[in-house]
Image (cartoon, grey):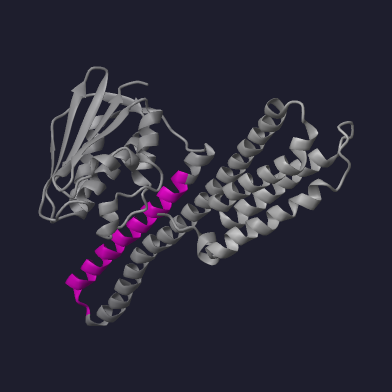
């Protein structure tokens, strides 16, 4: 269950006590002006404005529960003190209809307030996670730089090159994290750009697989099949998608297990399949993995690095190209991601 920041700062007595005190203030407020229906500002207007004020403040101060309680209490107070007196001839048509409007407005205010709190909570969580993920490779880089400073005097060439290689890997990781963060921002504000050009799909995949094999020397990454097709699309963006699928396969599977990549031609396009033998994705979470900032529960438990934005970016790129990105997986038995892209879109 999500624990929002305002629930941690204020106990239940304060949150619901605030509602009761605020609701009692509506009684004298509603009777402040005359009841004439011909006045623009009268007791009915004041009571409705007071209702909106109390519900809004209660939802802001205490959350969804207090907001709903304020909605019910103030609606009943207004009914028994003002509304029932104003329309004695038509209680069902007049009073109950207005009470229904009060309830509807109150529930909407409460839900909107809760949604705002949830967005703030997710933002805070994301910032904390992003800072942690970026800090890790930077800490590693700093450590290896300190080791290099000590090894330079001893001139241990083998260790020297090992440290330099690790610094390069961690620097690239930091760069990728920052790039992903910028890409998410661009997608959200509609400034994610694409550059369409014809390119050899097989050559792109071969290059990415080769690069990942060099980075993960102790992992067997196999590539089979071919398309022999020229695709008119954004080479760089589709490269991001393929890279993400491969890095995920490596990250979420045992070190000694293979990762298999297969490409083939389809009618009007190309397809790519990435298969691993890792932790798998539960069926209940398979649709959610393409949402922004979502991470599989098992991955969080194993403390695997990640921000939960790679597959979201990949899905947006594939969607732009009128393609399809699918997943089939069983917990503990691995995952198969499939990518289909048309030759021209």
Q: Is residue 248 above or below residue 11?
A: above
Q: In the shown orientation, is residue 40 left or right of residue 295?
A: right
**Residue at left offset 19%, top offset 52%:** 214
Residue 162: in magenta span: yes
Q: Quadrant of residue 259?
A: top left
Q: In this view, does 327 lie above or below 306?
A: above
**Residue at left offset 67%, top offset 42%:** 75
Q: How many marks?
A: 0
Q: In the shown orientation, is residue 231 left or right of residue 45?
A: left
Nearest to the observer: residue 223 or residue 305:
305
Could you tell me what secondary structure mostly forms the magenta stretch? helix
Q: Looking at the rendering, in which quadrant would you find the N terminus?
A: bottom left
Q: In which quarter of the image is residue 15?
A: bottom right
Q: Residue most toward the top?
A: 267
Which segment did they paint magenta? 155-184
Nearest to the observer: residue 261 or residue 56:
56
Residue 327 at x, y = what percent?
A: 24, 36
> From this viewpoint, is residue 336 visible?
no
Residue 94 at x, y = what percent?
A: 72, 28
Residue 254 at x, y = what percent?
A: 14, 54
**Residue at left offset 47%, top offset 38%:** 192
Q: Is residue 146 above or below residue 342?
A: below
Nearest to the observer: residue 75 or residue 329:
75
Q: In the shown orientation, is residue 64 left or right of residue 3?
A: right
Q: Looking at the rendering, in which quadrant would you find the C terminus?
A: top left
Q: In the shown orientation, is residue 325 left or right of residue 44?
A: left
> From this viewpoint, is residue 168 visible?
yes
Residue 20 at x, y = what percent?
A: 65, 57
Residue 299: in magenta span: no
């Amino acid at each position: 269950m999500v624990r929002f920041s305002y629930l941690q700062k204020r106990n239940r007595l304060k949150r619901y006590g605030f509602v009761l005190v605020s609701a009692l203030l509506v009684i004298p407020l509603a009777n402040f002006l005359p009841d004439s229906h011909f006045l623009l500002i009268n007791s009915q207007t004041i009571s409705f404005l007071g209702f909106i004020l109390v519900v809004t403040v209660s939802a802001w101060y205490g959350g969804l529960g207090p907001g709903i309680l304020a909605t019910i209490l103030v609606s009943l107070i207004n009914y028994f003190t003002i509304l029932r007196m104003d329309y004695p001839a038509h209680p069902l048509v007049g009073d109950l209809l207005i009470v229904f409007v009060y309830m509807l407005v109150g529930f909407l205010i409460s839900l909107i307030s809760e949604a705002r709190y949830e967005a703030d909570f997710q933002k805070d969580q994301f910032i904390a996670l992003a800072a942690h993920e970026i800090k890790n490779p930077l800490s590693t880089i700093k450590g290896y730089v300190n080791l290099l400073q000590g090894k330079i005097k001893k001139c241990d060439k083998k260790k020297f090159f090992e440290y330099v290689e690790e610094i390069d890997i961690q620097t690239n990781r930091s760069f990728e994290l920052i790039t992903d963060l910028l890409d998410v921002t661009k997608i959200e504000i509609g400034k994610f750009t694409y550059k369409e050009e014809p390119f050899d799909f097989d050559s792109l995949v071969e290059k990415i697989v080769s690069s990942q094999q060099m980075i993960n020397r102790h992992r067997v990454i196999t590539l089979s099949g071919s398309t022999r097709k020229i695709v008119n699309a954004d080479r760089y963006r589709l490269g991001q998608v393929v890279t993400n699928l491969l890095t995920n396969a490596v990250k979420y599977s045992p070190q000694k297990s293979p990762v298999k990549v297969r490409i083939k031609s389809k009618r009007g396009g190309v397809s790519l399949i990435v298969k691993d033998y890792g932790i798998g994705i539960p069926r209940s979470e398979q649709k959610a993995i393409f949402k922004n900032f979502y991470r599989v529960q098992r991955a969080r438990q194993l403390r695997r690095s990640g921000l939960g934005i790679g597959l979201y970016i990949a899905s947006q790129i594939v969607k732009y190209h009128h393609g399809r990105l699918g997943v089939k997986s069983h917990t503990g038995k691995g995952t198969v991601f499939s990518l289909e892209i048309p030759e021209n879109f």
